[in-house]
Image (cartoon, helix red, strand yellow):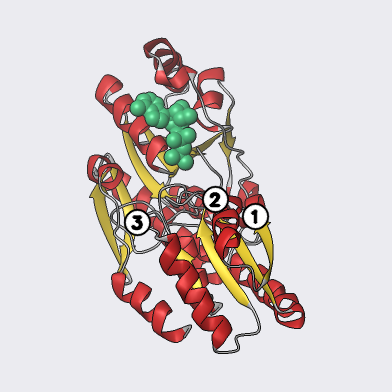
Amino acid sequence: MKKIAVFTSGGDAPGMNACLRAVVRTGIARGVEMYGVYRGYEGMIEGDIEPMQARDVSNIIQKGGTVLKSARSEAFRTVEGRAEAFHQLEKRGIEGLVVIGGDGSFRGAQVFHEEYGIRVMGCPGTIDNDLFGTDHTIGFDTAVNTVVDAVDKIRDTATSHGRMFIIEVMGRDAGFIALHSGIVTGAEAILIPETVTYIDELIELLKSGWNRKKSSAIVIVAEGDDAGGAFDVAEKVNERFDKYDTRVVVLGHIQRGGSPSAHDRLIGSRMGHSAIMELLAGRNCEMVGVVHNQIRFTPFSKATKFHTSIDHQLLDLAAVLSS
Ligand code: ADP
């Protein structure tokens, strides 16, 4: 394989640049001509594809977002769109792809391979940690640290004023960010999509804390929780328990940005390196993961179909430690 292209796709995540750097430099070290596709599948269709040298990825390992930019592409979901994307690759002689993205990006890559036979490897870049086949996705650790930083600051004011803060974090289908950040900030309650939320139980828990002279309360809510977002939860709680002066904070997109943590830079670098090495060795349509600190491979079909389950021991831990 003489020419390989790399692109970032779907939601951006801190550490994508570290992964991109590893892909480009490993490819060049192995004598491959490397290309970067800008704006994911959309840029592929439009031919926004440039050769990449080692110096083109200098000074990006510490940067959040993605220097290749990312996009969602409705056109790539169509037969015509994918035909044009393949034409753009073919005319440059590109024979292999590395996609850094989430489950949607991998589904697209699988379809693309089935139609045109182009070989592709994937690196999991998403803050949600919702891909099967890796302990952590690139960006998750940074997102959790961003939430922790914010919640620590909110706790200062919550304690000073005796307030309750209901804080919404990202996670439409997955509660990993909520659970991990909730444990390490000592949140009184953590509401996640993977478990049923009973408002009665939440109120009892908060009342009990109030009676035990807890001077503040923090409730972390994943945006996809079955009880609704933070505003819905606040309304339902306040109807029946109004001892604390309550405030709602939606952390939003700050969770996607920022300089990647050491952990995200490290797994991004390892995964990017491995994606190229394995593509050259003949592997195809698999996601690179890190499981128990070892590189592991999972077919796209499995990585996108299954969900890494929440560790219920962590939920129990959160309940005991916040008492
Ligand atoms: P993520 O990769 O973060 O999950 P998306 O779900 O938005 O993000 O997917 C990124 C892009 O992948 C989509 O905009 C679309 O172009 C492409 N894609 C997703 N699913 C498919 C599919 N079934 N067939 C073709 N392309 C797809």
User: In the shown orientation, is residue 263 left or right of residue 291?
Assistant: right
Q: Quadrant of residue 156?
A: bottom right
Q: Is residue 245 above or below residue 281?
A: below
Real-space Cα separation, disc 3 to disc 2, in angstroms:
14 Å
Residue 211 picture location, percent across and down:
55, 86
Q: Quadrant of residue 198?
A: bottom left
SS class of the residue under badge 3?
loop
Q: Amino acid at mark 1?
A: Val
Question: Residue at the location (49% across, 63% down)?
Answer: 178
Q: Is residue 221 above or below residue 65?
A: below
Which disc is residue 229 wearing?
2
Q: Is residue 286 above or below residue 161?
A: above
Which disc is residue 250 wearing?
1
Disc 2: CA contacts within 10 A as few (<14), some (14-19) or many (>=20): many
Ligand 1 within 8 Å, label 3 CB: no
Q: Earlier in the sequence, mark 2 or mark 1?
A: 2
Q: Amino acid at mark 2?
A: Gly
Question: Ligand 1 quadrant?
Answer: top left
Quarter the N terminus occupies: top left
Real-space Cα separation, disc 2 to disc 1, in angstroms:
9 Å
Q: Are marks 3 and 1 in contact (CB under 8 Å)?
A: no
Question: Residue at the location (35% across, 57% down)?
Answer: 196
Residue 71 picture location, percent across and down:
56, 32
Real-space Cα separation, disc 3 to disc 1, in angstroms:
20 Å
Residue 57 picture location, percent across and down:
61, 50
Query: In the image shown, does 282 or 175 lie closer to the viewer?
Result: 175
SS class of the residue under badge 2?
loop
Q: Amino acid at mark 3?
A: Glu
Q: Is residue 269 visible?
A: no
Question: Which residue is denoted by mark 3 in the rendering?
Answer: 194
Q: Earlier in the sequence, mark 3 or mark 2?
A: 3
Query: In the image shown, does 164 or 2 lie closer to the viewer?
Result: 164
